[in-house]
Amino acid sequence: MARSRSSRSSSLGFINKHNWVDWLVSILLVVAIIIVAVWVCNNPNRDSADDSYEEAFYSSCGSHNKEEEGFYSPEGSSTATSVSSISQLDSVGDKDIGCCLVYYKQCGHCTQYKPVWQNICSKVNGKTYGGKRVKMFECGDDQHPKAWEQVSRRFGIQGYPTILVKIGGKNADWVEYTGSRNALKEFLEKGG
């Protein structure tokens, strides 16, 4: 009897040891898959061709939005147009007032200002003041990182949040808004 117990315990020991190795291999594979998935999703050097797959995915889900294609939000829209291409900022014409919030998602100041920004957008976006229509934009690293990098580089932005304004007219250009962020609504309502 002692022998049969000994054989059983040795065979059970092999099974337990074998299961332990399987668990370890499984855990390592899951960790490797997660690391690859995070790297693929956050790789800043992705090909622009990857964006077409992303675009196809979002359009198939029904969440695709004309604003992402460069169209401006309809009159009275309470949200800012997300800048997916720096050329969207060129849509601010002679009879417009453009306002663009450039932010960094992990910035504490940006996070605190976002509700104020959204409130301002809900009150002035698409409205006309002094014969000029207000167009609100926002550009962040969490929505369209390539556009965010281009906007930051083009306008020399080094601190976030930064508000850019363009008061339409001859030879108008985007400049940094230096007034109080909380007074931005009044600034826009006065026509800049």
Image (spheres, rainbow, N blue to C red):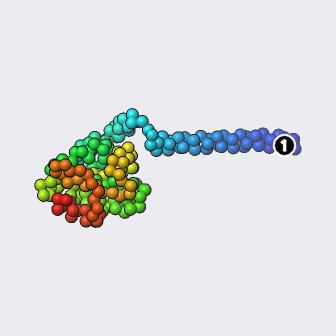
- Left or right, 23 with reference to 86: right
* Residue 52 point in image, percent of width and height: 36, 35
Of 120 and 93, which appears nearest the observer?
93
Query: 43 or 167, which is in the foreground?
Result: 167
| Number of marks | 1
Percent coordinates x, y for residue 167 in the rendering = 20, 54
Q: Residue furthest left?
A: 131
Q: Position of 75 compared to 16: left or right?
A: left
Q: Is residue 88 left or right of residue 96?
A: right
Q: Quadrant of the C terminus?
A: bottom left
**Who's the residue at 27% across and 64% down the image?**
179
Quadrant of the rendering where the N terminus is positioned: top right
Q: Residue at x 14, y 58 (%)?
A: 129
Q: Is residue 148 visible?
A: no
Residue type for callout 1: Ser
Residue sticking out furthest to the right = 2
Q: Residue at label 1?
A: 6
Q: Nearer the viewer, residue 119 or 101?
A: 101
Q: Position of residue 108 (x, y in %)?
A: 41, 61
- Circle 1 packing at 10 Å, graded few (<14), some (14-19), many (20+), is few
* Dot 1: element: helix
Residue ID at (46%, 44%) = 42
Q: Can I make out residue 120 in this image? A: yes
